[in-house]
Amino acid sequence: MKKIYLLSFILLLSFGAYSQIQEPVKWAYAAKKTGNNEAVIFVKATIDKGWHIYSQNIAEGGPTKTELKFAASEDISLLGKPSEPRPIKKFEKYFGVNVAYFEKQVIFQQKIKLNKNNPVVKGTITFLACSNKECLPPEDIEFTVAVK
């Protein structure tokens, strides 16, 4: 009987721990050729209501900025830095600086030169998701996009 109670208790704890996991940001990736040897990589964040992620351009002392890193490859060359739309800007008392962030949705874009036909582009996104109540730990998401 003790084993049944113990097993039930462990199961309840595991269900409780699972329900605590929050994923307020969903990521999607795409690529579009814009010429014979150029393309654009699109990295889209869909952000749950009440949450936001920060811009790539954050002042020192502020929160963790969103950062797109592309794996080195002979198949492509990066053309400039990733671009982003105009963010929402405001002063955040917690960080003591003006911050720029996105709510609902944001699409980052990276122009690339194709050094090979049909390359596969790999990279990592680092971001911080916050609500008006809490911030989750910074997260790294790996991605892969085929350019066809």
Image: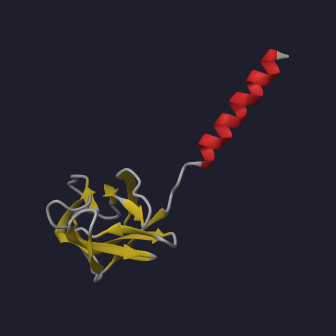
> Which corner quadrant of the image does residue 53 belong to?
bottom left
From the top left corner, tell me how far across and down residue 50 is, in percent.
Answer: 49, 71
The residue most toward the right is 1
**Residue in front for this viewpoint, 37 or 123:** 123
Name the residue rendered at 67%, 41% in the picture. Answer: 15
> Which corner quadrant of the image does residue 111 belong to?
bottom left
Quadrant location, the N terminus: top right
Colouring style: secondary structure
**Residue in front for this viewpoint, 98 or 122:** 98
Name the residue rendered at 25%, 57% in the picture. Answer: 69
From the top left corner, tell me how far across and down residue 115 is, in percent.
Answer: 21, 63
Is residue 122 visible to us here? no
The residue most toward the front is 93
Quadrant location, the C terminus: bottom left
Name the residue rendered at 42%, 67% in the picture. Answer: 132
The residue most toward the top is 2
Name the residue rendered at 27%, 81% in the picture. Answer: 35
Is residue 111 visible to us here? yes
| Horizontal side of residue 24 vs 116, given as left or right | right
**Residue in front for this viewpoint, 42 or 27:** 27
Q: Is residue 41 above or below residue 67?
A: below
Q: Is residue 125 above or below residue 58?
A: above
From the top left corner, tell me how far across and down residue 141 is, in percent.
Answer: 39, 53
| Horizontal side of residue 19 vs 118, given as left or right | right
From the top left corner, tell me how far across and down residue 45 is, in percent.
Answer: 42, 69
| Horizontal side of residue 18 vs 133, given as left or right | right
Counting every numbered tag in the picture gives 0
